[in-house]
Amino acid sequence: MLPLRLFATNRYPTGGRINSYSRPEYLLDIWLKKSSFGGLLKLPIWRSSQSGKLVHQVLCRSLVTDKRHKMWFVYGGQPIRFSMREFAILTWLNCNPYPPEEEIKEMQTPRRKDETYWKKLFGPHSSMSIRDIVEWLKRDKRLPKSKRMDGQKRLRLALLVIVEGILVCDSSNVRATRKAAQMLADINSFDSFPWGRLSFERKMLLATHGFTLAIQLLILQAVPLLQNYLLGPDDSQTFAFRSVSQLTMCKRFHNSTILETEMDEKLQVESILKMEDTLELGTITWGDEVEDERIDFLCDVIKDGHIFKAESWHGGFSNLPSIYSGNEKDVDKVQADDALEVDLTHPKVWFWMMLSSKLIYLSIGLPSFPLSKGYQVLTPLPPKRRRRGPRRYGHSSQKRKEVEVEVEADMYEDGLYTPFRDVNPQLWEKFLAKLASHGEK
């Protein structure tokens, strides 16, 4: 009755990491304590030093479910839930329902084309990156008070950096959008908009989008033993203290340390995060959420205090070598059970596999990942050398030996297969149909 694993126990891809587009270090240069984003300043600094390896390994421990707005992981045999409730608890962001579409459209549309709020913020500039805005704010802060920009303009720029540079970013070179800039015309409406909900939706769409740090904050909160590998010893320091000038990447999490913690006899896992009494979450439900009997059963046994073990979880792709180098007698039975095939027609399986194919092999050249007998997922092609001139998409000259599928050239970017980024839905359906027909042969 429990949901199946994405990867079999102890058989996870080991060579990848997550490259996050979000930049929480921008919080070091912004002070918005009295806004709806003030909760971000309560984040512990040392937990906010991003580790692409840790987030990658957490995603590899995912469960396959029908839920649209919930993710479940298994660490040390214990389940961990990530939903908008957990997201709101960890980030203190506004995750209430969206305003009516008509109201949102009115906020994003200027009354006259020649009266856009973009011009008031950026003048003649037709494009502005978030990084440039941050540098602009830094330079302005060093100027004499008489030469600094207007306080309201500075506040609006800071809000724009938080939203588009930290919460809802979806590319490496994040640029300010005209819709978000127009929404700043009414700063109160902008501040009360449920940006937390939007950020969570981006996160559910693709792991590199939105506030990626939320996954790391979740696992560090749910598994206290992992905090032993943080860069700083004092977990009480937050962004509000301004005691750190820069936020570096946390490189102390490796496959060995993550697995060692997972096998630790002192391991304690909080499956569903507890909420502080002073925190008000608001309305965090979804109207389009679907039922999943396996998840309902999982929640029931968690409430009953059931003790989970590694052998409690089955399924998952078991073609990868085991990363457990110790005595494997304890996992032999699990691996035998994991040999059961996962239903490859399940849309969630395909979603996670294609999602994982991008995340796990991001910017690295690993051999193709075997999906199961007769199936193999399309893995990223080796990136070509950078050439002068316009960027070229596609690697049509390189043939795929695993599965012969006709894929249009614009579905590739920098040698990475990105099926959920600006892809025609009809082409995606055609892609799945090709794979299904291949399996029937």
Image (spheres, grey):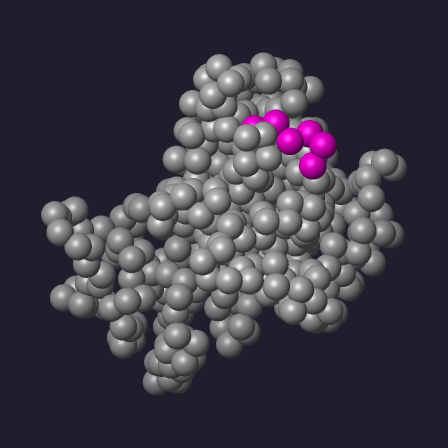
Q: How many labels does the image show?
A: 0
Q: Who is closer to the viewer here, 8 or 27?
A: 27
Compared to residue 10, the image places residue 255 above or below, namely above
Q: What stretch is highlighted in magenta?
A: 30-35
Q: Image quadrant of residue 284?
A: bottom right
Identified at 49% across, 23% down, the residue is: 148
The answer to whether residue 320 is magenta is no
Q: Who is closer to the viewer here, 138 or 198?
A: 138
Compared to residue 353, the image places residue 275 above or below, namely above
Q: Who is closer to the viewer here, 228 or 441?
A: 228
> Quadrant location of the C terminus?
bottom left
**Visible residue check, residue 404:** yes
Question: In the figure, is residue 282 to the left or right of 108?
Answer: right
Question: In the figure, is residue 132 to the left or right of 351?
Answer: left
Q: Where in the figure is residue 344, as x and y percent of width and height?
A: 49, 73
Q: Image quadrant of residue 93?
A: top right
Q: Please, what is the dominant secondary structure of the magenta stretch?
A: loop
Question: In the figure, is residue 396 to the left or right of 143?
Answer: left
Q: Image quadrant of residue 401?
A: bottom left
